[in-house]
Amino acid sequence: MASAAERAWQNHIQAHQTAKANGQPPPRPGDWVCPKCWPRVNNFASKNVCYRCGEPKPPLGTVVPEPTPEQKKSSGPKINFGVRGDSLLQTRADEAKAKKMRTFKTEFETEFWEIFGNCYVDYSISAGENINEVTKSITDGPIFDYLCVGVSIGDLMDVREWNKVNLMYPPTLDRELELLAVAMRSKAQGSMAWVGAPGEFWGRGTTWDTYMERARNTLRTAGLQVVPAETVNFVMNQMTLSNDGMHIGNMEHEKSTFAKAWATCLMAAASDPTWGRALEGEARQVEAESNEAAGAVALAMQRAKRKLEGRSRSPRR
C-alpha cells in the first residue's frame, strides 16, 4: 500500500499539465551508458561503476541492448527536478592534486532516484553570487515539476572582507528574498528552500544564526516551504568545512548524507503541505501573541454582542 508521501507525489504527477520527459544532457567523449539501468543512465568517463546501480563499466565497444517492452512500460512518468542556488551547493576539495571545486549533482541524482524513482535532475548553481543572481538564474531558466533552492546568502558577508559577517542585516535583503520566492513559485508546481548553515559550522557566531532565522521566516511568509533550522543544523554538523572556510568539504560519504537529507525533506514536504512553514524564534512568538490577542478581541466582541442582544429584548409584562 502506497504511503501518504508516495500518494502525494502520484497526485502531483497527475496534476501536471504536461508529462513529457526532458532528455538527458548530451554525453561527452568517453562517457558510457549503463547496460543494466532503465531508464538508461549516462556515466562520466572517469567512473568505473554506474553511479546509480553499481554496475561495472562495460568494455569499450559494448553494444547496450534495447529495453524490453516490460521496461518501457514500467518506466512511468519522469519527475523533473530543478536544483538552483549559490555556493552552498558547491564543494571544495582540499587535496593539492584534486580538482578544487565540485558539486553535489551526482549525489542528488542518486538519492532522488532512490526516493522518487524515474526522475531527472537539472543542477545548475550561481556559485559566489548574491540572492538576486540566483533569482535571475531561476527567472531565466526552464519550468520544473519541483524546484529545490539552496542558498548560503553571500549578501550577509562584508564585501570588503569576505570572511566577516555584516554588522547590520542588509536593508534590501528581505525584498530580494521575497522576489526569490516569487521566482521559485512561478517556475515550478512545488518548491522548497534550504537556507544556509548554523554559525557554529562556519565559525560566525550567534549573529549569523539570527540572520538565518530572519531569512527563513521571510521566505516562509512569502509562501515557501523552508527546511526547519533544527534539520539544517543537524545535517550541517555532519559536514566538514573546507580549509577556505567558505565551502562544504568534498567528502564523498558526507556528500551522500547531504543529498539524502534533501531527498528526505522533499518527501516530508510532499506528504505534508504545512511542513516547513512554521515561523521560527521571535517571529513565532510574535505570531502566537498576535493570534492570542485576536482571539481575545473576538471573544470580547461576542460577549458584547450577546449582552446587547439581551438588553434589546422587550420587557416582561
Image (spheres, rainbow, N blue to C red):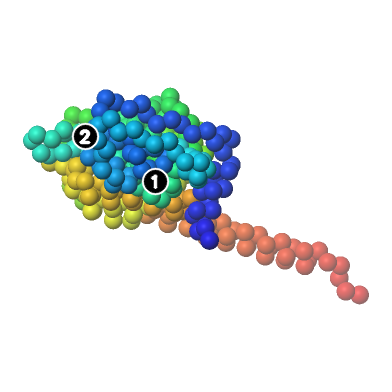
Check disc 2 and report its element: helix, strand or loop.
loop
Numbered tag placed on residue 113 in the rendering: 1
What is the quadrant of the C terminus in the image?
bottom right
* Helix, strand or loop at mark 1: helix
Left or right position of 250 against 289? left
Residue labelled with disc 2: 46
Give how far across and how far down residue 49 sits, in percent.
25, 42
Q: Horizontal and vertical percent for residue 11?
A: 57, 48
The amino acid type, in three-letter code, at marker 1 is Trp
Q: How many marks?
A: 2
How far apart are labels 2 and 1 at the CA level?
21 Å
Q: Residue placed at 36% from the left, 43% from the top?
A: 36
Front-most of 33 and 272?
Answer: 33
Q: In terms of depth relative to the viewer, which is nearer, 75 or 249?
A: 75
Return the residue nearer the eye: 75 or 159. 75
Picture coordinates of residue 249 (x, y %)?
18, 43
For this view, does 85 lie left or right of residue 297?
A: left
Q: Is residue 130 above or below residue 104?
A: above
Question: Residue 291: x and y, percent?
Answer: 52, 57
